[in-house]
Image (tube, rainbow, N blue to C red):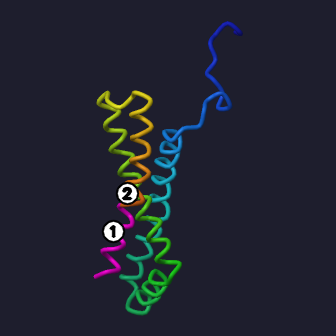
Amino acid sequence: MADRPLSPHLQIWKWGPHMLVSILHRATGSGMATVGLGILIWWLAALASGPEAYETFAGVIGSPIGILVLIGLTWAFFNHMSSGLRHFVLDIGAGYEIERNKTGSYVVIAAGVLLTIAFWAVVFLK
């Protein structure tokens, strides 16, 4: 049994931006699924329950903490989308060279932040 090859342990691998992007892709997907679904269900229940319930929902979601949660969900969406596009490029066989892979990872991180800022700039400036 000792003759079979073993995968390198995480302590052997050097930390890189591609690892961060991979972890963030999974975390943002899970975050959107749980937090986003919870907010969607709360919103639908508030709509169905009448004006008082909807006012409560609107008050909480319009508070600074509610807006911060929405900004976080927006960042999660744009980061997950950018990472998904990066994975699409990798799936077609491009971008596996280490420098291109690192550059693509940095682009994903920057795109998530910049698209979130642009989205909320439009929301707040209207």
Q: Which mark is residue 36?
A: none
Which residue occupies the extreme right position in the image?
2
Q: Quadrant of residue 118?
A: bottom left
- Per the image, label 1 sits on a secondary structure element best described as helix
Q: Residues within 10 Å of mark 2 (few under 14, many from 20)?
A: many
The residue stretch that appears in magenta: 115-126
Residue sitting at 35 percent across and 33 percent down? 90
Q: Is residue 2 above or below residue 83?
A: above
Quick check: is 117 in the magenta stretch? yes
Q: Quadrant of the image for the C terminus? A: bottom left
Q: Considering depth in this image, is 20 or 42 the residue closer to the camera?
A: 20
Q: Is residue 78 above or below residue 26?
A: below
Q: Could you tell me residue 62's position as x and y percent?
A: 44, 83
Q: Is residue 3 above or below residue 8?
A: above
Q: Considering depth in this image, is 47 or 95 the residue closer to the camera?
A: 95
Residue placed under numbered mark 1 in the picture: 119
